[in-house]
Image (spheres, rainbow, N blue to C red):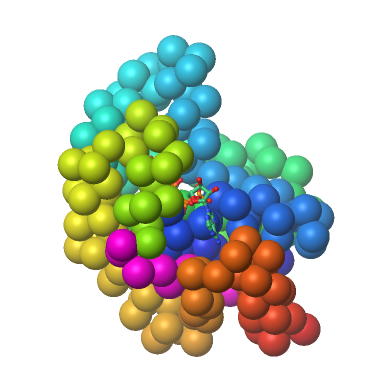
Amino acid sequence: MLVVFIGPPGSGKGTQASQLCQHLSITHLSTGEMFRAAIQEGTELGVQAQQYMDRGELVPDQLVVSMVADALRSSPYNNGCLLDGFPRSLPQAEALDQMLEEEGKQIDLALELNVDEEVLIDRLLARKRPDDTIDTIHHRLQVYREQTSPLLDYYRDRGQLRTVNGKGTVDEVHQQILQQVAEKIP
Ligand code: AP5
């Protein structure tokens, strides 16, 4: 099973991905977490990624795609995998489809978490991660609108997209996600 989570910053991708992966016993791959680990470890990838993350920009496609390709090759994802925060641009989505096609696989579900911007801003300001300053949040939201939201049509056109309202409590959103997963992947 291959699931992709799409949603703006603060929409609950990480929170919901952890719960769904636990429920389905599938592997959780978060590109944001992978970059934060690389920064923590002081690797070359971390040094390169940090300058983009601090500004709220996307890390260049080429760096992200090769990191994900390595992770997919090395992760034990027999039951399946949930990609949280990847893809985030059309070139990334096309690269992912190509990677999967080479293995005779495809995405089963692209799940959009839809949340109003005022709610997102409140959640992120309350969290206080280094890239959760008001200016960076506004920029991340703009990057989402411009570079990531076109993926909604990309997956809708392929019949792979489902949307859930991400505004309720964590548990309410989780229940909606379970329902969508059950309908799409019986
Ligand atoms: P990433 O770590 O993916 O950040 P993001 O997309 O900005 O998302 P967040 O982690 O801020 O939010 P989330 O949707 O996961 O919500 P969460 O569950 O944490 O990426 C960081 C950076 O890395 C990017 O800006 C970019 O630079 C780079 N990057 C990553 N992937 C990339 C890619 N593919 N290409 C290029 N660059 C890439 O929840 C947020 C808060 O809300 C938490 O405090 C949580 O407790 C709370 N919360 C969650 N759900 C609820 C709820 N239902 N009710 C109330 N509070 C809630």
Give the residue displayed 52% in from the left and 25% down from the top.
37
Residue at 77% over, 53% down: 22
Residue 114 in the magenta stretch? The answer is yes
Give left or right: position of 46 versus 106.
Answer: left
Nearest to the observer: residue 72 or residue 103: 72
Give coordinates of residue 94: x percent, y percent.
38, 63
Q: Quadrant of residue 147?
A: bottom left
Quadrant location of residue 87? bottom left
Q: Is residue 169 left or right of residue 126?
A: right
Determine whether, in the image, residue 63 is placed left or right of residue 76: left
> Does residue 110 appear in this view?
no
Q: Quadrant of residue 16?
A: bottom right
Viewer-nearest residue: 16 or 93 = 16
Q: Is residue 166 above or below residue 87?
A: below
Q: Main secondary structure of the magenta part?
A: strand
- Viewer can see residue 140: yes
169 or 9: which is nearer to us?
Answer: 169
Please tell me which residue is depicted at 45% across the width and 59% down the height of the picture: 11
**Quadrant where the N terminus is found in the figure:** bottom right
Left or right placement of residue 178 versus residue 128 in this view: right
Most foreground residue, 8 or 119: 119
* x, y percent for residue 151: 35, 70
Asked if residue 36 is among those painted magenta in the image, a careful observer would answer no
Q: Which residues are magenta?
A: 109-118
Q: Count up the numbered dots.
A: 0
Quarter of the picture containing the C terminus is: bottom right
